[in-house]
Image (cartoon, rainbow, N blue to C red):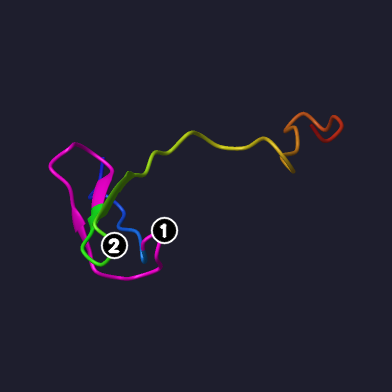
Amino acid sequence: MTERAAPFHCPYCGDEDLRPSEEGHGAWECAACNRAFQLKFLGLLTRGLRRSDGGQEI
């Protein structure tokens, strides 16, 4: 896996002063509002995908 993706702003206050947290992968701390949050990739959505065998849209 490559380097972790960094969020651009805090989801709570919108500030950009974020640092990786020691709580684990995907965990971030906001210095402005003193909150911690975690980002997690859940998977790909199936909306809009087409079948490769020429069938109907899923």
Left/right of residue 49 with respect to residue 35 in the rendered view: right
Q: Which residues are magenta?
A: 10-28
Q: Secondary structure at mark 1?
A: loop
Q: CA distance from mark 2 to mark 1?
A: 8 Å
Magenta stretch: includes residue 25: yes
Q: Quadrant of residue 57?
A: top right
Residue 52: x %, y % from top left:
72, 33
Tell me: residue 14, above or below residue 58: below
Question: In the rendered image, which residue does mark 2 sit on?
Answer: 33
Magenta stretch: includes residue 24: yes
Q: Split into 4 quadrants, where in the image is the N terminus?
A: top left
Look at 19% across and 36% down and name the residue there: 24
Q: Main secondary structure of the magenta part?
A: loop
Between 1 and 42, which is closer to the camera in this rendering?
42
Disc 1 marks a residue whose amino acid type is Tyr
Look at 18% across and 52% down and name the residue there: 20
Numbered mark located on residue 12 in the image: 1
Does the residue at mark 2 contact the one at mark 1 (Cβ under 8 Å)? Answer: yes
Of pointers 2 and 1, the one earlier in the residue sequence: 1
Between 40 and 9, which is closer to the camera in this rendering?
9
Residue 21: x %, y % from top left:
17, 47
Residue 27: x %, y % from top left:
26, 44
Tell me: residue 22, above or below residue 28: above
Between 41 and 56, which is closer to the camera in this rendering?
41
